[in-house]
């Protein structure tokens, strides 16, 4: 169901797009690629002058290669467009710090710890955060195959609260009623 109609007339001002695709590789790994773009409908000022409408202020790419445990084993990072041109892209090599990070609880904290503030790019960090859930979706079958291991999704959102009816119905072994 879409959002209800707006209360008043409006015109487009800005669009941020995040596009993420996942690929199962023939070597047993997965590539998850994301792109973040920001575009305005009117000319907007950037560091070296006016950016024409429809031209991206930000266009950043990130690729994670992950193994069967959702651990990042390789990273590629590219900045095609930034408000400070080439200076924005100089941070790309620092995203190698994500190699060895497991996409699991604490993943977003690891992004902030390793690449927060001046150690990284706000926009690439936002993209990396969104890519975490895409990694888990792409690997759903692999990550949920062991019946002896608690599914990673339990207590990850309100619908899969360990004391909730969905866990009781679909994952009864891991159901935990709220203490009385």
Image (cartoon, rainbow, N blue to C red):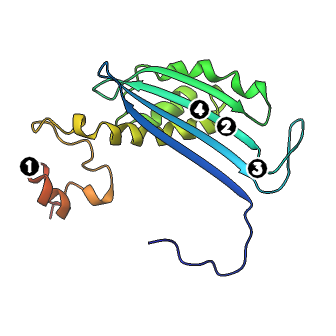
How many C-alpha atoms fall within 10 Å of the one at disc 3: few (<14), some, or many (≥20)? some
Give the residue number, with chain letter if any, for mark 2: 59
Could you say whether the residue bearing mark 4 is in a helix, strand or loop?
Answer: strand
Q: Residue furthest front?
A: 26
Residue 45 percent coordinates (x, y) = 87, 46
Residue at the disc numbered 4: 61
Q: How many marks?
A: 4
Q: Is residue 98 left or right of residue 121?
A: left
Residue that label 1 marks: 173
Q: Residues within 10 Å of mark 2 (few under 14, many from 20)?
A: many
Residue 39: image x %, image y %?
72, 49
Q: Nearer the viewer, mark 3 or mark 4?
A: 3
Q: Are marks 2 and 4 in contact (CB under 8 Å)?
A: yes
**Residue 12 relative to residue 154: left or right:** right
Q: Is residue 44 left or right of residue 144?
A: right
**From the viewer's perspective, is residue 46 above or below residue 43?**
above
Of the two numbered discs 1 and 3 on the same chain, state the one appearing first in sequence: 3
Mark 1: secondary structure: helix
Disc 2 or disc 1, which is closer to the eye? Answer: 2
Q: Secondary structure at mark 2?
A: strand
User: Which residue is at a point 50% across and 22% down the rendered structure image?
Assistant: 75
Residue 54: which numbered mark, if any?
A: 3
Q: Nearer the viewer, residue 123 or 145?
A: 145
């Amino acid at each position: 169901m879409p959002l209800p109609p707006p209360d008043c007339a409006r015109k487009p001002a800005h669009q941020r797009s995040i596009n993420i695709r996942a690929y199962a590789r023939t070597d047993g790994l997965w590539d998850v690629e994301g792109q973040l773009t920001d575009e305005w409908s009117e000319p907007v000022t950037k560091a070296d002058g006016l950016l024409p409408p429809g031209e991206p202020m930000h266009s950043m790419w990130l690729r994670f290669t992950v193994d069967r445990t959702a651990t990042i084993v390789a990273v590629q990072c590219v900045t095609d467009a930034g408000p400070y041109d080439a200076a924005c892209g100089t941070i790309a090599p620092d995203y190698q710090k994500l190699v060895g990070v497991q996409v699991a609880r604490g993943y977003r904290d690891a992004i902030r710890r390793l690449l927060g503030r001046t150690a990284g790019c706000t926009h690439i960090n936002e993209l990396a955060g969104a890519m975490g859930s895409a990694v888990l979706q792409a690997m759903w079958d692999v990550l949920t195959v062991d019946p002896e291991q608690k599914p990673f999704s339990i207590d990850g959102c309100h619908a899969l609260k360990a004391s909730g009816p969905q866990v009781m119905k679909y994952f009864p072994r891991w159901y935990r009623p709220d203490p009385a």
